[in-house]
Amino acid sequence: MNSINYQLYSMLIGSYLLGSLSFAIIVSKFMKMDDPRSYGSNNAGATNVMRSGNKKAAALTLLGDLLKGLLVVLIARYILGDQTGADAIVGFCGVMVVIGHIYPIFFKFKGGKGVATAIGVLLGFSPLLALLLLVTWFAVFKLSKISSLAAIVATLASPLYAYILMGNSSYFGATVMVAFFVIYKHKGNIIRLLSGKEHSFKKDNK
């Protein structure tokens, strides 16, 4: 029993620590750019890094943040195999990597909003689930040119997609928790959207 608990705690802590590797900050430092928390939306994420004008840095940030979410799920699945309750533990590991991204211990708990990492986690749960989220994000962004609105709508839709695809499973429960943290992190965006003051890429292109 103690060995099982040790394995569980190690996996959860490891997931959080991997999530705490904020690629927006790491890539920006490596490429000698300003800290993404010092400009734009002050968010350590790919969208804000894109506002610096460095598309390569934004792409690397997006890829890094997505891959860490996917890797946590794949590694947890590999370690646990067919053990009883494996899906529940894998789901919690997915939640922890998102929490680590949002509140990274390595960067004074000031991280990103968790969208890319969440997509990576959900990709590990189900490739079709991740595809549906990406289609939803692109459709909303195409119409609105507002990245945060696209992220919020896709995140709100994720539990519904997960339930349709996987039923009332551990992965569905984990998806609900991931969605909660991502939406909570977007509370400022929601307030600005309601007041009509949210940042739009359409305005930038005028």
Image (cartoon, rainbow, N blue to C red):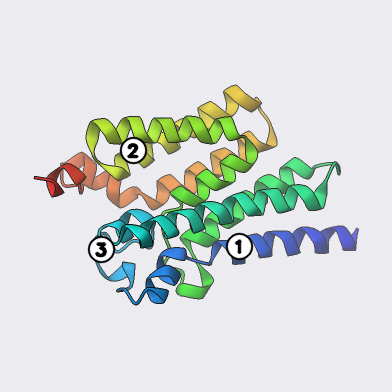
Q: Residue at the spot x=8%, y=45% of the render? A: 206
Please name which of the two marks, 1 or 3, marks the residue nearer to the observer.
3
Please name which of the two marks, 2 or 3, marks the residue nearer to the observer.
3
Q: Which numbered dot is residue 16?
A: 1
Q: Hey, what amino acid is under mark 3?
A: Ser
Dot 2, crowdedness within 10 Å: few (<14), some or many (≥20)? many
x then y, percent, for residue 34: 30, 74
Q: State the CA–CA distance, disc 1 to disc 3.
A: 28 Å
Dot 1, crowdedness within 10 Å: few (<14), some or many (≥20)? many
> Considering only order in the chain, which callout, 3 or 2, is on the residue closer to the N terminus?
3
Q: Residue at the spot x=67%, y=64% of the render? A: 13
Q: Which numbered dot is residue 52?
A: 3
Pointers 1 and 2 in contact (CB under 8 A)? no
Secondary element at image label 1: helix
Q: Residue at the spot x=60%, y=62% of the render? A: 16
Q: Hey, what amino acid is under mark 2?
A: Ala
> Considering only order in the chain, which callout, 3 or 1, is on the residue closer to the N terminus?
1
Pointers 1 and 3 in contact (CB under 8 A)? no
Q: Answer with the quarter of the image where residue 176 lies.
A: top right
Please name which of the two marks, 1 or 2, marks the residue nearer to the observer.
2
Q: Hey, what amino acid is under mark 1?
A: Tyr
Q: Quadrant of the N terminus?
A: bottom right
Can you say whether 199 is above or below 6 in the image?
A: above
Secondary element at image label 2: helix
x then y, percent, for residue 72: 65, 54
Q: Which residue is mark 2?
A: 150
